[in-house]
Image (tube, rainbow, N blue to C red):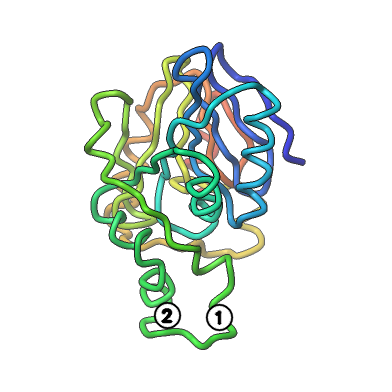
Amino acid sequence: MYELRKVGSKTYYMECPSKVGFYLLDDNNVCVIDTGSSRDYGRIILKTIKEKGWNLKLIINTHFHADHIGGNNYLEKHTNCDAYVSSLENVITQNPIISPMMLYGANPLEELKSKFVIAEKSNTKDIEEIKDQFEIIELPGHTTNQIGIKTNDGVVFIGDALVGKQIIEKYTITYIYDVGKYLETLDKLETLEGNLFIASHAEAVENLDDLIKLN
């Protein structure tokens, strides 16, 4: 658990319940892709970065769900990094109470405000500010404006655009915000080129065909 795996000359990911990506921008600076579900993830991420002798330059979040931005607040406070997410979802990461309100249709009971539903506030910025520096792929459906990131190694982080067999067997029906957009994203993924595809809650694979059929 929390093992760092190298999958390209500059690309790594952490094997954990909600996968975390690491993409070297140069010899010293690293971009983290998603930060897990809590401050504990943030601590583990920062410890890993320090052990590698890297400097956390920025965070890119594939979407606003708490299990993807949970470590943002900790990392922002303990480093000088900036965090980025798609424009519409930027409002939600800065005002995380919106997330459970969208899920339940109202302000949820205190018992439902767990770290898995509502994250600490993150001072995210609009991904449009750095879009020319990365290959950003729009993957809406699971959320309003989910994005994927493709590194120069051909490794594609796709967030929750697809989930693994274990998740589907456990929940049967996964969370989808917009079914129409979700189906369009599945079509896009069928032709998406890459050397390795990393979904947050599935095994990393070289070919998405089986995962697409499963979803």
Could you say where residue 9 lies in the image, as x and y percent from the top left?
A: 55, 11
Instruction: Tell me: 145 left or right of 38.
Output: left
Q: CA distance from mark 1 to mark 2?
A: 10 Å
The residue drawn where x is 51% and y is 29% is 197
Location of residue 40 in the rendering, given as x and y in whole percent from the top left corner = 67, 53
Characterize the local packing of mark 1: few (<14), some (14-19) or many (20 or more) Cα atoms within 10 angstroms.
few
- Observer-nearest residue: 205 or 52? 52
- Identify the residue at horizontal 49%, vertical 63% (top origin): 120
Numbered disc in front, either 1 or 2:
1
Amino acid type of the residue that numbered disc 1 sits on in the rendered structure: Leu
161 lies above or below 174: above
Identify the secondary structure beneath mark 2.
helix
Location of residue 98 (image quadrant):
bottom left
- Which quadrant: the N terminus? top right
Q: 151 and 69: which one is in front?
A: 69
Judge from the rendering whether residue 181 lies leftward or rightward of residue 158; answer left or right.
left
Q: Residue at x 23, y 36 (%)?
A: 129
Amino acid, disc 2: Tyr
User: Sequence-wise, which precedes: disc 1 or disc 2?
Assistant: 2
Q: Are marks 1 and 2 in contact (CB under 8 Å)?
A: yes
Q: Is residue 64 left or right of residue 170?
A: left
Residue under label 2: 104
Which is more toward the observer, 88 or 129? 129
Which residue, given by chain and number where applicable, does mark 1 sit on? Answer: 112
Q: Position of residue 193 (x, y in %)?
A: 39, 21
Q: Which residue is rendered at x = 45% and y = 30% of the image?
A: 57
State the SS at label 1: helix
Q: Is residue 170 above or below residue 107?
A: above
Image vertical order of residue 96 relative to residue 144, above or below: below
